[in-house]
Image (tube, rainbow, N blue to C red):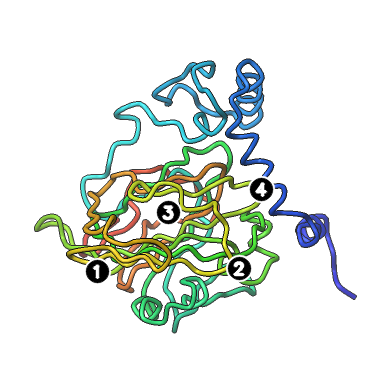
Amino acid sequence: MPNFNIESLAVLAQYPMPKRALTWLAGKLAGWRGGAATTAMIAAFARRYRVNLDEAAEPDIARYATFNDFFTRALRDGVRPLAESGLICPVDGAISQFGIIEDGQIFQAKGHHYSTLALLGGDRELAARFKNGSFATLYLSPRDYHRIHMPCAGRLTRMLHVPGALFSVNPATARHVPGLFARNERVVCAFESEAESEVDSAPGAFAMVLVGATIVGSVATVWHGQVTPPRRREIRRWDHGQDRGQDDNRNGGKEANIELARGAEMGRFQLGSTVILLFERPDIRYPTDWRPARPVRMGETMGRLDGNPV
């Protein structure tokens, strides 16, 4: 007989839940310009999740026209200094898992793995780059800063929107839903990198996978704007080259030659979710104090490739 506990029962309840309808409703509510009602909603959220408004570029919640504006708020200059060298953490959040990709398999939680091929929407060429590389999975809770930044300088090579489910991505769900991150809707951004200085090494190819979840109203990138919604049944792909971008679903040529600096904003979530980083190099050395559930902040050292201690 299955051994159910409160956590597993809570996760089980997500299966019949109308997740798409809830997400649509949350998106509408988050974009609503409700004046005093919106301010009251923001105030209640800030109290419930103990949001540190002192770090916000705009600490006055009455100045936010919508909940989305508040949720994707900018930070004050200087509150997230960038580590002097090495890969930097791209988000505020907590570590879910990290380590080596073994023959295309990524560790999710005890008893659960998923493949790079599934995560990357069946793109065999891209998945092959990370078959024996490194990964880090970072969870953003509702209280966190929700803009996503570059771990190193990179040139965009392709972007995919992979449709999928909208399970929660909190740690409890990751422990109980097989292949969670390869089942949920996600936006895959693939980059190539080069060393920025003589003291830094480059990770080569790397990918940033922005995973959707229940009530995540949208995922956006700085070069494209809102990627989802719309939520379609087919995978959408944008290829970026030296001369022009090509899009299987719209006219190409608008998004070629996207290059972003280390620490630059690359995207954002509207409501919390997860970012998965894939690196083709297996020799990334993560900090010795990294462990699952450890809090991280954007700009701190995430890993090194130059042989120096972390």
Contact, mark 2 vs mark 1 (Cβ under 8 Å): no
Residue 289, labelled with which disc?
Answer: 3
User: In the structure shown, which secondary structural element does the residue marked by tag 3 occupy?
Assistant: loop
Residue at x-position 47% and y-position 41%: 146
Residue 196 position within the rendered picture, expressed as x and y whole percent measured from the top left: 14, 55
- Location of residue 27 (image quadrant): top right
What distance separates the C-alpha of mark 2 from that of mark 1?
27 Å
Q: Which residue is mark 1?
A: 204
Dot 1 falls on a residue whose secondary structure is loop
Note whether 178 is above or below 63 in the view shown.
below
Residue 78 is situated, as x and y percent measured from the top left of the image, at 29, 29
Give, as a three-letter code, the residue at label 4: Thr
Give the foreground label among 3 and 4: 4
Distance between mark 3 and mark 1 Cα atoms: 25 Å
Q: Which residue was labeled with disc 4?
A: 23
| For discs 1 and 4, the disc positioned in front in the rendered view | 4
Mark nearer the viewer, 2 or 4: 4
